[in-house]
Amino acid sequence: MDADAQLESQIARWRGYVSGHRVISPLDVDEMEGHLRDQVEDLSAAGLTSSEAFLVAVGRMGSVDEISREFAREHSDRLWKQLVLVPAGTESASGRHPRELGVVIALAACAGVAVKAGLEWLPEQALVRNASLFVLPFLVAYFAWKRDMPVRAAAALAIPFLLTASALNLFPFVGAGSTEIIAAIHAPILLWLVVGVAYVGGEWRSQRRRMDFVRFTGEWVVYLTLLALGGAVLVGLTLGAFGALGVDVEWFLEQWVVPFAPPGAMIAAAWLVEAKQEVIENIAPVLTRVFTPLTVAMLLALFVASVASRSILGVDRELLILMDLILVLVLGLLLYSISARDPHAPPDVFDTLQVVLVAAALAVDALMLAAMLTRIAEFGFTANKVTALGLNLVLLVNLVGAGWFGVRFLRRRCGFDAVERWQTRYLPVYGVWAAVAVVVIPPLFGFG
């Protein structure tokens, strides 16, 4: 490889890494690359080789020292680290970073207070119905603060929460009716996309920023699961230890740990993803490569068992709900796999496995749709059936598009950006469907 080609390769790798950093927009990356190229040109004119000039130029990019340091840890040799890996203590603690932990603790405490107030003042049904309103507003506040969103733009994000709260609490739901459960399930989906708007700092039209949010969602789930498992172990050990001493601490756990720990963990998980992004990004490809083949095997087994049973058209509602949950899990795994993949890498065996995953999910979805249509033809429409049918149709369209672009990518008819673009452009569809489930379906079926 000649010097110019090697330099372009180095700059492309640097740009790809910097572009993945959540707080830097594509326009900022373009400007930074321009500065980088100017410095490389000046250093080359001073007698350095292109590789030496590139290393020194990146080392001088003071505004991205932190990003360059993480890039160096993953990609470079000793010379690179000597040039770029400045000690963390030499960075200026500018901006809000020194205060971020305090903000996170304050927001987690506020979320805990909201949950405790709900437990004290709301009846059980209203508490479950409004669960998403206790924590997600504080996640929005965290990201709006961290992204330095304008006050007016941040305040506008409260509108979806107010409208959702109005629908959930003003609709005359029949006690324990289907539409109340449907609204309670879909409200968090709708509001999570509002969290996404805050996460991307209002840049929702950016494909890259939407994919960043998809990646964040997967990483957040991983961290939240780890915190939940660790918390469960800690609570179990605490109960055992105090029980051995004859001290009753269950009242304390019920009154203070239960209201504050789950919402605190949700806020803390978001902060950990932001603070320790590079650690999870190393784990993400491993997780997707482990669970994708296992999920393919599960879907194929389900499909074969369903066909062999010869009763798929007469399955009960519980099985249909379970199948829908499996398809949602498959979609989450697919999105996480896409977000964790290097978009510049050529097609490989894992990409083929992804297409097989989509094909297996489509086969299962087709069986579920046939079963649902049969039940509707036999028993008529209900709120649950319409909701399940709508969800399956939304998933079907997404999976068809994912399979189409996946095959085209394998055949080198398009780049991986087309696969990403399909998923990021489809995200608002889930928000629209969730809004329909919360606002339209309940009155359509008399709130029963």
Image (cartoon, rainbow, N blue to C red):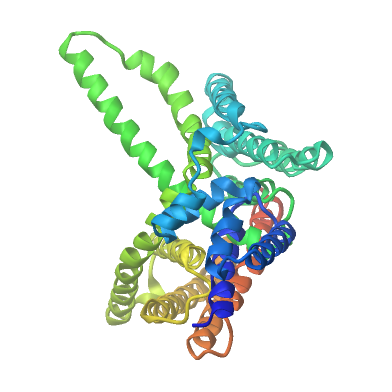
Percent position of residue 218, x then y:
48, 54
- Residue 224 vs 280, above or below: the answer is above
Decide which of 367, 273 is in the foreground and name it: 273
Decide which of 301, 277 is in the foreground and name it: 277
- Quarter of the image for residue 333 reads bottom left
- Residue 339 vs 182, above or below: the answer is below
Q: Residue at x 39, y 59 (%)?
A: 77
Percent position of residue 183, x then y:
61, 48
Q: Residue at x 50, y 91 (%)?
A: 411
Percent position of residue 20, x then y:
58, 58
Can residue 26 be seen here? The reply is yes
Can residue 381 be seen here? The reply is no
- Quarter of the image for residue 286 reads bottom left
Could you tell me how many numbered marks the image carries? 0
Percent position of residue 102, x then y:
57, 24
Q: Residue furthest right?
A: 152
Q: Residue furthest left?
A: 244
**Does residue 288 appear to the left or right of 143 in the view shown?**
left
Decide which of 410, 61 is in the foreground and name it: 61
Decide which of 98, 139 is in the foreground and name it: 98
**Does residue 151 appear to the left or right of 14 in the view shown?**
right
Q: Residue furthest top?
A: 246
